Amino acid sequence: MIEVSNLNVRLAGKPVVRDVSFTAEAGTLTAICGPNGSGKTTTMKAVSGELAYRGSVHMNGAEIGGLEPWQLAEMRGVLPQASSISFPFTVREIVRMGLASGRSRHPEQADRIATESLAAVDLSGFEGRLYQELSGGEQQRVQLARVLCQISEPITDGRPCWLLLDEPVSSLDISHQLAIMTLARQFARRGGGVIAVMHDLNLTALFADRMVLLKDGRLQAEGSVKDVLTDRHLQGVFGCNLRVNRVPADGASFVLAHSALGD
Ligand SMILES: Nc1ncnc2c1ncn2[C@@H]1O[C@H](COP(=O)(O)OP(=O)(O)O)[C@@H](O)[C@H]1O
Ligand SMILES: [Mg+2]
């Protein structure tokens, strides 16, 4: 489990995350949603162990501030929101960075994991391509393959591993969005944990188990998608006229922007 209690982060002297508490269970996909600037990325960076914070963040029972970098690297992989790389690395070199930061592996096993990770993000055959010469969506998938090389198993030594994904599908076409969200959900169903910052409320409704809703650095709601994805919460947080509807066949939620309809 990841337990975040009274998380506070200040950046450049300004409080950016204020008293945020939530939990994410292994076996589930937890989505963090909220407007631009609401503190989603900052929260993810704190939970990843990349930013100083006040409060507590427990990952599998340990306060992350007390873990060594290698312990964190074996327990969680991080997909940042943006990854600009200014050197001419190949795709192969970037996924190898994931292998290097995770657990040590036999060379054949490392090769197999690299090949499988690239296949999982639909980039087989891209090994020799230069990262800088790929499209934004392809670069995002290379970064995810790097994370999957680092955290290749949802459970290691009997403990869940975590994928912390900041907008994993924001640059992707619909088919790759569905493929990557399916992959993330399968990682969770196999016993791992996933926290993903999501902008697309409909993909969130389809794939997430739980939702954390932020506004102005504060928690507005936390719970099951059914309880959090409501007209009242969404209108309060996003300030526009959204309505949550249900597909009759299976009752899955979808969100319609009524403002756009002149309603
Ligand atoms: N390095 C920084 N220094 C100062 N303020 C920052 C920094 N990074 C982010 N912020 C501010 O913190 C707030 C939250 O940012 P962020 O967590 O990136 O939001 P989100 O991911 O929800 O869009 C924003 O107002 C942003 O301008
Ligand atoms: Mg962000």
Image (cartoon, grey):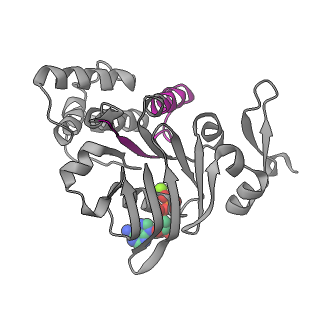
37 left or right of 105? Answer: right
> In the image as oriented, which residue stretches furthest toward the bottom?
13
224 left or right of 187? Answer: right
**Span shown in magenta:** 158-185
Task: Give the camera-side residue of 209 and 146.
Answer: 209
Magenta-span inclusion, residue 174: yes
Please give the count of numbered marks on the rendered protein.
0
Task: Give the camera-side residue of 179 and 171.
Answer: 179
| Residue appearing at x 12%, y 25% in the figure | 106
Write down the quadrant of residue 256 in the picture: top right
Q: In the rendered view, would you say 160 is above or below 230? A: above
Write down the quadrant of residue 174 in the picture: top right
Q: In the rendered view, would you say 8 is above or below 124? A: below
Q: Position of residue 260 (x, y in %)?
A: 79, 48
Task: Give the camera-side residue of 209 and 150.
Answer: 209
Magenta-span inclusion, residue 223: no
Regarding residue 167, the answer to whether it shows in the image is no
> In the image as oriented, which residue stretches furthest toward the right?
263
Q: Position of residue 50 (x, y in %)?
A: 31, 60
Regarding residue 172, the answer to whether it shows in the image is yes
Q: Position of residue 25 (x, y in %)?
A: 48, 45
Q: Position of residue 91 (x, y in %)?
A: 25, 31
Write down the quadrant of residue 112 in the picture: top left
Q: In the rendered view, would you say 129 is above or below 3? A: above
| Residue appearing at x 59%, y 49% in the figure | 211
| Residue appearing at x 25%, y 27% in the figure | 129
| Residue appearing at x 49%, y 38% in the figure | 169
